[in-house]
Every structure is written in structure tokens, then in C-alpha cells.
Amino acid sequence: MPPNITPFFDTTTCTISYVVYDESTGGCAIIDPVLDYEPRSGRIHTDFSDKLIDFIQRQHLSVEWILETHAHADHLSSAYYLKKKLGGRIAIGDRIPAVQTTFKKIFNLGDEFIPDGHHFNHLLADEETFHIGKLSARALFVPGHTPADMAYQIDDAIFVGDTLFMPDVGTARADFPGGNAQTLYRSIQKILAFPSQTRLFMCHDYPPDGRDPAWETTVSQQRKENIHVHDGIDEQTFIEMRNKRDATLEAPVLLLPSIQTNIRAGDLPPPENNGVSYFKIPIKTS
Ligand SMILES: [Fe+2]
């Protein structure tokens, strides 16, 4: 039986979080859940995640995994909150220590932050298989957007993370620390080599004017229609397009708080001696 896939679209960050479950056992995975954050006030809330909790409880599902495709730079993860509420194991790709090491330096984090991936319950290797109820799942290493991105194949569906976007939007940026357009192109080709009817589920959608948000396509549709990587666009052309476009993009609004939370699997920086957690802003002078 194919997985039941329920998407939840976060209108603030244009992220799609998913609940994927096996109807026969009720075992489920949550993919890329979003924690609400108000940058002007520093206030966190859980309205979006509570919708996922409500759905999971109504369907009597049992959370086995909370899967992150990567350390997101555009939204805070609610993995830590959801784990506390529902259980499950938080997993991300096994290259995450490289990302943690990079950002430990950028944010000048102290000795308390050990960049070895221990914040997550499990680090998934390329091609590693695991189960969600009776569903078979497989982790696919798809770096380029960051050096540690994973996609997750569950039956005939692949959750592509930040590699591809919907065909009329294109592909993810490759200019974050450790990102690389050539690597991203090769990761995308790995996804597009799957059978043509493979269903692809996006992590984000930024719909052009007049189109409703969407998140599901197929390999075949991407190969025909993706504006950045349809069949016939070679690696060099893609790299030039991607680098040129990335040079025009601004930093995501929630970049700094997102990274500081997501390298801790959705936990906040440790509270200071007044009991309050703080985010840092490295100030650039040039
Ligand atoms: Fe991302």
C-alpha cells in the first residue's frame, strides 16, 4: 500500500511540512516541520506545529521519525518541540557535523556547542534504509544547496528537500556556506534518474502570481518543464545560471535565528543566567 502523504503549507515561510504514514500500522514520519517565529518580537509559537499534532492525534498515528532534509536557513524547525510532544527520533544527514562546524565558527559558539551531530537522534547515511511502520524508506544524499542535504524516498515518493522547486520556479539556491551549484546539478540529476512516474514532493513553493501553492510533481514533469534543469540543460549552463541568480538573492529573513536553532535539531540556544535564550547577530562591517 502506498504511503499516505498529508502536506501542511506554512504561508509565512512557504515551507511544506509533511506527515507520511502507513495506514496498516499507524506508524508515521514528520518531514521538515516548521516552528513559528516572529522576528520583530523574538516570539516563538507553535500554531503551525499544533496543526500537525492535532492531525496525528486524530488519525491515531504514532511518530517514529522526525526527518529534516537539511539545516534550513529560512525557517526554524519544530523537531525538538514535536519530539517532546509526540516522541519519535529526529534524523538528518550524516554530513551535518560539517554544517555545525561552519556555523559554530560564524556564531562564535562556546564550548557548550559540540559540532558532532549528537543533537539529532540519528544521522542518516547515503542509501541507508529505514522503516516507517511497514513502509520502506531510503535516505539519498543530495548536497549542493548545503553540503549535508538529504532527500527521502518512501515507496514511489521522494521528498526532495531544497534541490528542485516546482517546475515553474526551478531550483534551490546554492550560495550558502558549503553550497555548490555543480554539486546541486549532480544531485538533481540523481533525483531525475528515477522512473518517470516517481512522485516528487517539494520542501518549498514560491508560487508565481496567479497560481496557488503546489508541492507535488513527477520526475517526468520536472524533466520536461523545470525552468532551470529540464532535459537539455547541461551542467555548465546550469552552473552559470545558478551562480548569476544567487548573486542577486538577499539573505532569507529568518536566516540567523533559523540556523542557530536548526543546528541544534530545533532546540533553542541554552538559556542565559536569567533563564532567557538569545540569538546572536554577527555584524558585518564590510
Ligand atoms: Fe533550505
Image: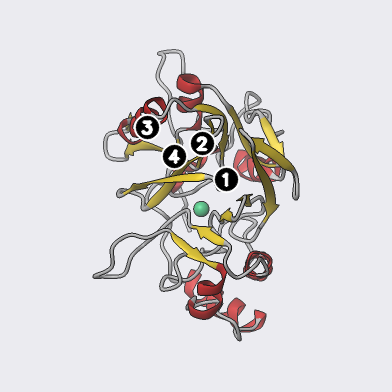
* Amino acid, disc 1: Met
Mark 4, residue position: 76
Tags 4 and 2 touching, CB below 8 Å: no
The residue at the point 26 percent across, 70 percent down is 209
Instruction: State the CA–CA distance, disc 1 to disc 3.
Output: 21 Å
Q: Which mark is residue 1?
A: 1
User: Mark 4: few, some, or many residues within 10 Å (few <14, many ≥20)?
Assistant: many
Image: 212 above or below 262: below
Q: Is the residue at mark 3 in contact range of ligand 1, meaning its CB lies under 8 Å from it?
A: no
* Amino acid, disc 3: Phe
Query: Which label lies toward us, 1 or 3?
Result: 1
N-term mark: 4 or 2: 2
User: Mark 2: few, some, or many residues within 10 Å (few <14, many ≥20)?
Assistant: some
Mark 3, residue position: 55
Q: Residue furthest left?
A: 210
Q: Which mark is residue 15?
A: none
Image: 148 above or below 42: below
Q: Is the residue at mark 2 in contact range of ligand 1, meaning its CB lies under 8 Å from it?
A: no
Mark 2, residue position: 23
Front position in the image: 71 or 108 = 71
Instruction: State the CA–CA distance, disc 3 to disc 2.
Output: 14 Å
Q: Quadrant of residue 121?
A: top right
* Amino acid, disc 4: Leu
Tags 2 and 1 touching, CB below 8 Å: yes
* Amino acid, disc 2: Glu
Query: Which label lies toward us, 1 or 4?
Result: 1
Tags 3 and 2 touching, CB below 8 Å: no
Residue 243 drawn at (x, y percent): 55, 73
N-term mark: 1 or 4: 1
Helix, strand or loop at disc 1? loop
User: Mark 1: few, some, or many residues within 10 Å (few <14, many ≥20)?
Assistant: few
Residue 10 drawn at (x, y percent): 34, 46
